């Protein structure tokens, strides 16, 4: 029974590690985000 519990804890640890890694990648992309430039040819009336 103890071995099953250890495997579950290990699996949860790997899942948490994977989620943290994905969040780190998402934060890196958000940090480097450049908003699109407004159109250079604005319509004037």
Image (cartoon, rainbow, N blue to C red):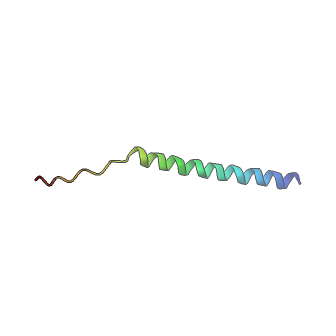
Q: Residue at x 52, y 46 (%)?
A: 24
The total number of labels drawn is 0
Residue 38, position as x, y percentages in the image: 23, 51
Q: Quadrant of residue 31?
A: top left
Q: Residue at x 65, y 49 (%)?
A: 16
Q: Residue at x 80, y 51 (%)?
A: 6
Farthest residue, direction right: 1
Residue 18, position as x, y percentages in the image: 60, 52
Farthest residue, direction top: 31
Residue 10, position as x, y percentages in the image: 74, 51
Farthest residue, direction left: 45
In the shown orientation, is residue 15 left or right of residue 45? right
| In front of the other: 2 or 33 | 33
In the shown orientation, is residue 37 left or right of residue 19? left
Q: Residue at x 14, y 55 (%)?
A: 43
Farthest residue, direction front: 45
In the shown orientation, is residue 38 left or right of residue 10? left
Quarter the N terminus occupies = bottom right
In the shown orientation, is residue 45 left or right of residue 22? left
| In front of the other: 24 or 30 | 30
Residue 22, position as x, y percentages in the image: 54, 52
């Amino acid at each position: 029974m103890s071995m099953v519990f250890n495997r579950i804890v290990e699996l949860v640890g790997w899942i948490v590690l994977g989620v943290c890694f994905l969040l780190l990648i998402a934060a890196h992309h958000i940090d480097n985000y450049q908003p699109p430039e407004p159109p250079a040819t604005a319509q004037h009336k």
